[in-house]
Amino acid sequence: MAVYTHVSAEALSTFLARYDCGELISAKGIAEGVENTNYLVDTTTGRFILTLYEKRVAADDLPFFMALLEHLAAKGLNVPPAIKDRRGVAIQELEGRPACLIKFLSGVSVSHPTPAQAEAAGRAMAEMHAAVADFGGARENSMGMPSWRPLFERCGRSLDEIAPGLYDDLGHALNVVTAAWPDDGFDRIAIHADLFPDNVLMLGDHVSGLIDFYFACTDLRVYDLAIMHSAWSFDASGSTYHAATGEALIRGYASGFALQPHETAAFPLLASGACIRFALSRAWDWLNTPADALVTRKDPLAYLRRLSHYNPDLVKHLT
């Protein structure tokens, strides 16, 4: 279970006393979270999510995340804004960590999305992008293209401990993709940057919520779609591309934002960049996460296989 920080019932009851949300009935750690500590909290007035922000989420970034969620909620999107206490404060402290009490959204994340679910999710991303047109906040993408080479260099030749040839493949892909990375003529807006299937709540084929905005940042709008496409359109190993799902995702998005010719032309490059980004972050975690850690390491090679779909010439050693 990915609960890094234990919260006692007594400490949680004291914390909840700041809010008009009733008294504590129960709290259970949520195993799905990998970046933060999350509890499902039931009180006498309803159900909430308690999130304690661990070291990967900088406290200084929280006001941006909270402002973005509040903006999207005000636009009518199904996102989970932080709940303010009686003093109007959203960001608290609990057990030495920044913490927020968050609105609970019904729904489940799907492991194997159908084309209908992918189309609905693509449409939800388009609605989110439309809603941020007048959002004034900005945050640099901490995992954006300029961060990839420093992360690659920190991993170094240890990448070959994961798989022989991984260092050369990622280094070659990095050189090609960063040299061609687009900028001029592409919309830059607030993006989610991590809209994997586990960050979309579904009720049947209907999207009931978009969650986990803790990589949200200002970057290329179409790059957000490319990240999503790389996450939704393959099996877990990255070996099999589900064309019907990938096409449905693009179709759903295009119902709100039709891709322009230059965006369509750049899409394989942007998707290749998404693959490099997640291969590198997974590789870093793979090399630096202790074997007995609470978090299950994710296979970086799954994103090399996706990369070979978007650009076969970039992957020489791995399949």
Image: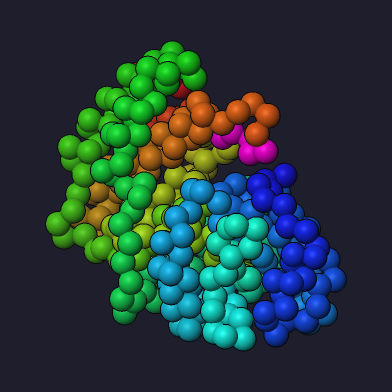
> Magenta stretch: residue 258 in it?
no
Nearer to us in this view, 208 or 149: 149
Q: Is residue 72 above or below residue 290?
A: below
Q: Is residue 11 above or below residue 3?
A: below
Q: Is residue 53 above or below residue 267?
A: below
Where residue 202 appears, x then y in whole percent? 64, 64
Q: Is residue 290 above or below residue 158?
A: below
In magenta, the rendered stretch is 294-299
Residue placed furthest toward the right = 25
Q: Residue at x 58, y 80 (%)?
A: 84
Nearer to us in this view, 91 or 74: 91
Determine whether, in the image, residue 70 is placed left or right of residue 155: right
Residue placed furthest toward the top = 164
Residue 78 image-quadrant placement: bottom right
Residue 24 image-quadrant placement: bottom right
Figure label count: 0
Quarter of the image that includes the N terminus: top right
Q: Residue at x 78, y 81 (%)?
A: 22
> By what rule are the colours in the image chosen?
rainbow
Nearer to us in this view, 43 or 204: 43
Q: Is residue 309 something that shows in the picture?
A: no
Q: Residue at x 38, y 40 (%)?
A: 277
Q: Residue at x 71, y 74 (%)?
A: 16
Where residue 276 appears, x then y in whole percent? 37, 36
Where residue 188 appears, x then y in whole percent? 26, 63
Nearer to us in this view, 189 or 37: 37
- Secondary structure mostly seen in magenta is loop
> Magenta stretch: residue 298 in it?
yes
Q: Is residue 269 something that shows in the picture?
A: yes
Determine whether, in the image, residue 38 is placed left or right of residue 264: right
Where residue 28 appears, x then y in whole percent? 78, 58
